[in-house]
Amino acid sequence: MGGALSRRDFGKALGLAGAGVAAPALLAGCSSGSARSARAAAANGAANTWQVTGKALASLGAFDTTMKGFMQSRDITCGQLAVVRNGKLVLSRGYTWNVSTAPVTQPTSLFRIASVSKPITATAVLRLVQDGKLKLTDRPATLLGLSTAADPRLEDVTVLRLLQHLGGWDREISPDPVFADWVISQGYGKPLPISQADIMRYASAQKLDHAPGSTYAYANYGYTLLGQIIEKITGQEYADYVQRTVLAPLDIQRMRLGASRASGTGEVEYDSDRIVTTILDSSGKKVPAPYGLFNLENLDSAAGWTATAMDLTRFVGVYEGGTSVLNTASIERALAEPETGVSADGWYYGCGWQVRSYSGGRMNIWHSGSLAGTYSMLVRRTGGLTWAVLFNQRPEDDAPDYDIDTRLLETSKTVQTWPTGDLTSTYF
């Protein structure tokens, strides 16, 4: 490879003027076509029917009604919902709105969870801090040997600032490095697929968009660096450390990193109306967006996990306390206000979580995720309610909003008598 390339150099390599602006349109690589429409045609006009699997305790039928209405109005074929109240799993369902011959979504089916992976990575980082193997004040540039020649301010990025999206990268100003596969490949004259090392090399050659610590700006790249730090400190693969240290103590055994090219065993298929040129190789092949618009392996620590909804609600139990994963001090550090970035209406991004504080130390914490073919939401509310909802598509073009959290909240208010049983032992 040649030397470091600036954004302007990348633009010249691609024959573009102002690559920083033009790159996002290039990255999409979209053409006309509909993967979902093709499947519907193959079904010879067969009507969709409902199949609901899993278990729900008494008095919770309204959640089924909400999910079915939400999915049917948006033509979502696969969904999953888990609800926990006061630490007890009271509902774990799979929902299928498809032709009768389609695979049936189970409560144990795996879904990509996109950026709901970030709380998992943050928990692993906080465990390293808790164990004295890492400091929140440590500098990623030093830990990972990143060049600061393009912008000496990179030295001011800390582990804590990565966790809180205060590192200085801003995808509203510059292209998101983790989705810059075409730009990096053509700019460096390297065939696809690119690697995380290529992404880090490219990002380190650019100036930051903000001074570190000055501005909240959601940055996937920061969580890519956190995954690399976990590997550097532990000498283990990122996924291995997370599974052994975060998931295994909770008896979460289904979760695994996803794969770009196809759904794995026990995993749902992903829907999108978009056909794109794959970034997984240099073939120029046209593929459905969920299987070639992004490199899921490169997104591992930022957006790469697959899980079930009930795995996620069980994971949130770490932040209720009482597990061996994080102690009270680590939980408090995770949910504390950042040095800057509290919104006008009071929410902020802690360490891997969006947080809203209320009087008496009460907090709502949540995270959502979105990729082509994926929408995920994980919420822990005050009052003892937690839910996770997963879909195999996200809103595209003029589709209605995915306001599922609001709808589930309204549904929960209709439950007059909550069941006292617990389904946990059925699935864990």
Image: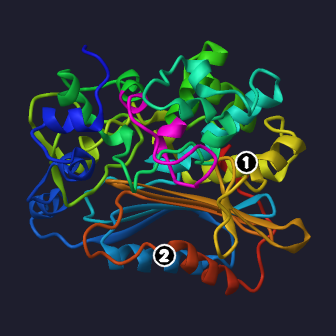
Is 222 inside the magenta-drawn segment? yes
Query: Image quadrant for the N terminus?
Result: top left
In the rendered image, the vertical position of residue 201 relative to residue 111, given as above or below: above
Mark 2–mark 1 distance (CA, rounded to whole Å)? 31 Å
- The answer to which image quadrant residue 40 occupies is bottom left
| Residue, disc 1 | 425
- Judged by depth in the image, the label closer to the viewer, 2 or 1, is 2
Q: Residue 206's spot in the image, x, y percent?
A: 39, 34
Earlier sequence position, callout 2 versus callout 1: 2
Which residue occupies 25% across, 26% down?
A: 193
Nearest to the observer: residue 365 or residue 357? 357
Residue marked by disc 2: 403
Q: Is residue 226 magenta?
A: no
Q: Is residue 240 visible?
A: no
Instruction: Decide whether the magenta segment is chiefly helix, strand or loop.
Output: loop
**Closer to the camera, 392 or 280?**
280
Residue 395 x/y as whole percent: 34, 67
Q: Which quadrant of the figure contains the C terminus?
A: top right
Q: Secondary structure at mark 2?
A: loop
Q: Nearer the viewer, residue 280 or 106?
A: 280
Point out residue 225 in the picture as x, y percentages from the top left corner: 53, 31
Which amino acid does the dot numbered 2 rest on? Asp
> In the figure, 110 relative to 129: above or below?
below
Q: Which residues are magenta?
A: 202-223
**Circle 1: residue type:** Ser
Up-down relation of residue 335 to residue 246 (above or below): below
